[in-house]
Amino acid sequence: MMNRVRDKATRKRKYWLILQLLIIAAIVAALIVVLNDAIKRSVYNERKDMLSLVTDMAADIVGENVQMEWNTVDIFRETVIHELELTDTVEEGIDLINARYALDDEYFFLVDENGKYYCSDGTFGKLTDMSYFVDNTEKKSEYLGTLPHMDPLETYMIFLTELEEPVHVNSRERGDTNILYVAYGHSISDLKEKIAELFPGATNIFIYDSTGAMLYKEFGISLLIEGYNIFPKFSQSKIVYGEDPDALIEMCKNGEDLVVQLNIKAVDYYFCSSKLDTLDWSLAFIVQAEYVGSTGTDSFSDIILYISLLAIVIGLVLVIVIFVSVRRKIAAERLKEAEQLADALGEASKAKTDFLSNMSHDIRTPINGIMGMTNIAKKNINDKERLSECLEKIDGASHHLLSLVNDVLDMSRIERGKIEITTTPSDIRTLCDNCASVINGQIEERDLEFIQEVEAEHPKIYADELHLRQVLINILGNAVKFTRDGGKIRFSCRETVCDDKNVTYRFEIQDSGIGMSREFIDHIYEAFAQEAGGDRTQYKGRGLGMSIAKQFVDLMGGKIEIESALGEGTTFYVTITFARDTKEHKDDRISAGSADIKGVKILLAEDNELNMEIAVDLFEEKGAVVDTAYNGREAFEKFTESPSGTYDVVILDVMMPEMNGLEAARAIRNCGRPDAESIPILAMTANAFEDDIRATREAGMNAHLSKPIQIDEVIKTIALYASK
């Protein structure tokens, strides 16, 4: 048992250690995650501030350039109208404009009603998508784009505006037509260089309007954003830091400045946007995250790595410290347990040795008396006086031996938790009278004064009479045993507190005996505890009674107090609270002296011939009529085959062949005869524990009489039930 408990405790400690390690690992991992996220967020916020500033600067640059280009478009619009009016063909008008203005990296061109354009460099072409102009009339003056015939290695911004009135012209190549739009194209290499200086070789620039349409974009941006609208891309990308996609689109529509970090095709980018002051456009660029503050990024990555490693090292150190600490604690506890176990085994061995020594002495003493007196009786078989003396001493030794066996069995059951308190309707006066009757029998040949006092205003209670009587008789017996002749014993019972439900009684047992020392009182409830000085031999004490009494009182919810001094006597106080019995009961008290079973018809079932002979002799001596059965089945058959009223009482042993006493009692109760339910059935058995008493009650028996039988108690019980 101790090994199982120790193994269980060891397993619990191991599980606790593993749990601690897991908790530490989880904490370290959580710290790393939280720290990593915090650092990344800090990096994002720092870069956001920087990128916002850069985006605003780029937007200012682009805004200034765009406004200048629109101013140029306005000038060209007036010039074109004037020159076209002076020439016969559109080609001549373009030549006049080229001659008047020296254009370097600049182009102007005219667009007719069919989408055909005439460029200042003498080339012709056709716009591939006229739907833009048709569907977005209000935006025709705000169009940026590129034309396919221009230098593919160069990037141009095309500014196109609609004429107030169409201009009818003739074209050598295309015939008569109406010019609707004038456009101006300018290389933005200088503008790109200014913006790209901020993020060398890593920037994708575009301009979009409030609908998300990209009015201008570089070739590289098409690799990231397909089509001509940026809004769908936000919903398709993972936002790492910044606004959610819906909020981001709304901010773009409102032209708000913003910086978000998003993941496109498994690569982190920063999307930066700022509204151009003079137009309903926004400048945006997408830059790969690794190009933004790369030195800071590397530094932060190193910080994250170092902190993570530090956290791991600290975690490992904590794990090792806890592991070593726990191992040391376990080792210390095991050592302590081993020492305690060794001490416990030593104490158990000593207790066992003391127990066997004490029991050997206590059992052999009455047995020696019985055997010795039996031999003397045999030698004096014709000496009636001497024979009577021997029988009296044999009887006393037998009672002492029985008391010893009962005490040992009680101690065993208490230690195993088998004792249960069972309360039944009782009368405190009857209980005290019974205890006094037993003590009067013990002091019959002693020169002792015994005083009994009972003050009970509410005597009807629910009590475990068996165990309470055992407690009081034990203490009273000690008073008789340890009080010399000429002394006095006082036994009192007084009601102290009472309410509607409960009543408290205080039992006081006072003697003028040898008394006890203060040191011994501290150990009086220990098994086999006895005062030193040879009293064990002189007074024949067993040292178990008070231990049993204390535990019984504790089980009943009471308390025992002691006042004593060597040579001055002892007083015991037993205080117990009982539930009140407020029901009306017939007064069934019958004294031993008034019990009479003369003429009572008894059916006695007992399988042991010696026990049967003793019982029949005792009952017939008292005038009873006895019919015998040697097993439960025979008793049942005799009862059922006889007329009603044949028997007044049925007495059954419990342990019998064919049908035991419990089965016989149930069979009688259920046989269907008119007197089957009313006839008293008594158990008379050597099974004397509470479980046995409960079993007899559940089988339908009225009372339980324990062997060895106390003839007065048996006669009184038979008389009680036979008279009902």
Image: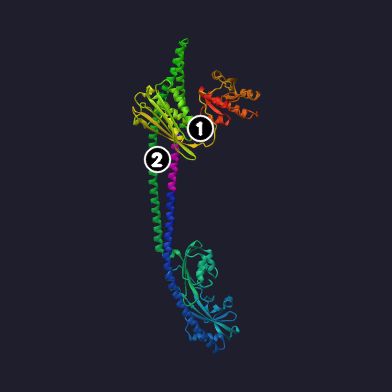
The part of the image, by quadrant, that contains residue 46 is bottom left
Instruction: Give the mark count.
Output: 2
Q: What crowding class fits label 1: few (fewer than 14 Cα within 10 Å), some (14-19), or many (20 or more)?
A: some
State the extent of the magenta-drawn residues as a range: 4-22
Q: Overall secondary structure of the magenta stretch?
A: helix
Q: Position of residue 23 (x, y in %)?
A: 44, 49
Residue labelled with disc 1: 426
Pick the front one: 60 or 375? 375
Q: Is residue 2 visible?
A: no
The kind of secondary structure element at disc 2 is: helix
Say which of marks 2 and 1 sits in front: 1
Upstream in sequence: badge 2 or badge 1? 2
The kind of secondary structure element at disc 1 is: strand
Q: Position of residue 357 (x, y in %)?
A: 40, 23
Q: Position of residue 483 (x, y in %)?
A: 38, 25
- Residue 16 included in the magenta stretch of the image: yes
Check the image and report above or below for 247 versus 381.
below
Pick the front one: 211 or 710? 710
Q: Residue at x 54, y 70 (%)?
A: 229
Q: Is residue 187 visible?
A: yes
Residue labelled with disc 2: 330
Q: Position of residue 460 (x, y in %)?
A: 50, 34
Disc 2 to disc 1, how far (Cα)? 55 Å
Pick the front one: 81 or 100? 81
Q: Residue furthest bottom?
A: 86
The part of the image, by quadrant, that contains residue 360 is top left
Amino acid type of the residue tagged 2 in the rendering: Ile
Check the image and report above or below for 127 versus 683.
below
